[in-house]
Amino acid sequence: MYAAYFDGACEPVNPGGIATYGAVIFHDRDRVWACSEVYYPEPGRERQTSNNIAEYSGFLAVLRWFIDQRLTDAEIMVRGDSKLVIKQMFGSWRIKNALYVPLALQGRQMLTQFSNINGLWIPRDQNHLADELAKAAQRRAGVVRRLEAA
């Protein structure tokens, strides 16, 4: 059984800030992969960022890792504190017209490659590892987070 966690952040403003994401994957209880990255929009669209884009970027990073490892038939549980991502990818929420739509559609397409994947919304306090990875990417990018500036 694999357990994957993802999170995203957009600071110092949302939308329009620096979008970052973090993700971590465990196989049984062993940590097998983690990432902490900045989302880079297409040139000319640098301010087209949001927390939802950051969250989707973390989710897509998880899916890419499983695809790259050829583990699409493994038993996978993806956990995140973004109700939007979890409900749109694994539930019944519609994808509405917003900046994140291309990423959401990419996620839906990627999910068709998996045979045994599920998603679960978790409260933010249960997502501390992925959250810290997203914040670490913010720090590396030189972002002063709103809560830290206050």
Image (spheres, rainbow, N blue to C red):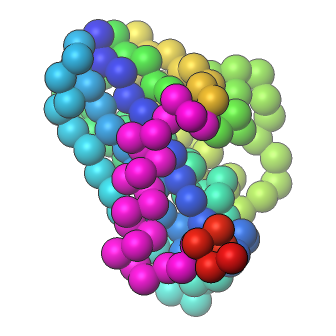
Q: Is residue 15 above or below residue 54?
A: below
Question: What residue lies at 42% left-to-right and 43% top-to-bottom?
Answer: 130
Quarter of the rendering occupied by the N terminus: top left
User: As drawn, which residue projects farthest toward the bottom?
Assistant: 44
Question: Which residues, given as a range, are shown in magenta?
Answer: 124-145
Question: What residue lies at 26% left-to-right and 44% top-to-bottom?
Answer: 34
**Is residue 31 rendered to the left or right of residue 139?**
left
Residue 32 lies, in percent from the top left, at 17, 32
Does any portion of residue 110 appear in the rendered image?
no
Q: Is residue 32 above or below residue 1?
A: below
How many numbered marks, from 0 up?
0
Q: Is residue 118 magenta?
A: no
Residue 70 lies, in percent from the top left, at 19, 27
Residue 38 lies, in percent from the top left, at 41, 68
Pick whichever, 61 or 4, lies toward us.
Answer: 4
Quarter of the rendering occupied by the C terminus: bottom right
**Is residue 99 rendered to the left or right of residue 111?**
right
